[in-house]
Image (tube, rainbow, N blue to C red):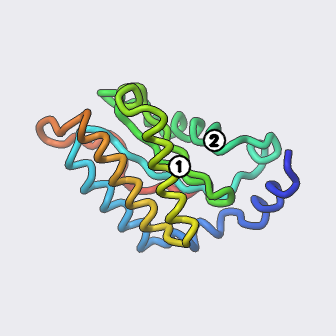
Amino acid sequence: MSIRRIGRHLLQHHWRAKRVFPKSVLDRIEQTTKRSEATHSGQVRFVVEGALDGAPLFRNQPARARALDVFSHLRIWDTAHNNGVLIYLLLADRDVEIVADRGIDAKVGTERWESICREMEVEFGSGQFERGVIKGIEAVSRELAKHFPPQGPHRNELPDAPVVM
């Protein structure tokens, strides 16, 4: 357990996520998600967590493990074609993780997901959080469109609104 990481999480806590992602930005991210889902039959969710607290923080839970917990909690795995994708940002660590259900993950693979995460982190490093998230959603959607094109009328299985934790 790193004292530095604990301090960063305690100091940056949840207020920072609300400051970096005000309602107007969250609305634009939601609209991007809606538009992108018209290009494929997959489901995309964006979640930002300002900082870990309680047990996850003191267990030194990595962002990847936390993203898996959020993926499960939000039931992103529960889509008809196993093609749900979570884009998770742990703001205190500036760490982006993509968790994809088995249907899409088998077709895209870890290297491509990691590449999208790194591209987003570059934007975040220059303070361009909204642009980074939108680019990430668009990149994930391009992958979904390749492997899960639209099939009839769009059935939205998961909410499009971003989640701030």
**What amino acid is at disc 2?**
Arg
Specify few, some or many for label 2: CA neighbours under 10 Å numbering under 14, 14-19, or 20 or more.
Answer: some
Dot label at residue 66: 2
Residue 113 appears at what percent x and percent y?
A: 45, 41
Instruction: Tell me which corner region of the image, top left, top right, bottom left or bottom right, holds residue 23.
Output: bottom left
At x 26% / y 48%, what residue is drawn? 37
- From what the image shows, is residue 11 above or below residue 39? below
Query: Which one is earlier in the sequence, the residue at label 1 or at label 2?
Result: 2
In the rendered image, the residue lying farthest to the right is 3
36 relative position to 5: left or right: left
At x 77% / y 66%, what residue is drawn? 11
Dot label at residue 145: none
Residue 68 appears at what percent x and percent y?
A: 57, 36
Mark 1 and mark 2 in contact? Answer it, CB < 8 Å: yes
Q: Toward the viewer: 165 or 37?
A: 37
Specify few, some or many for label 1: CA neighbours under 10 Å numbering under 14, 14-19, or 20 or more.
Answer: many
**What amino acid is at disc 1?**
Tyr
- From what the image shows, is residue 76 above or below residue 125? above
Quadrant where the N terminus sits is: top right
SS under mark 1: strand
Dot label at residue 88: 1
Residue 96 appears at what percent x and percent y?
A: 55, 51
At x 47% / y 48%, what residue is drawn? 87
146 relative position to 127: left or right: left
- From what the image shows, is residue 117 above or below residue 134? above
SS under mark 2: helix
5 relative position to 30: left or right: right
Quadrant where the C terminus sits is: bottom right
Residue 159 appears at what percent x and percent y?
A: 37, 48
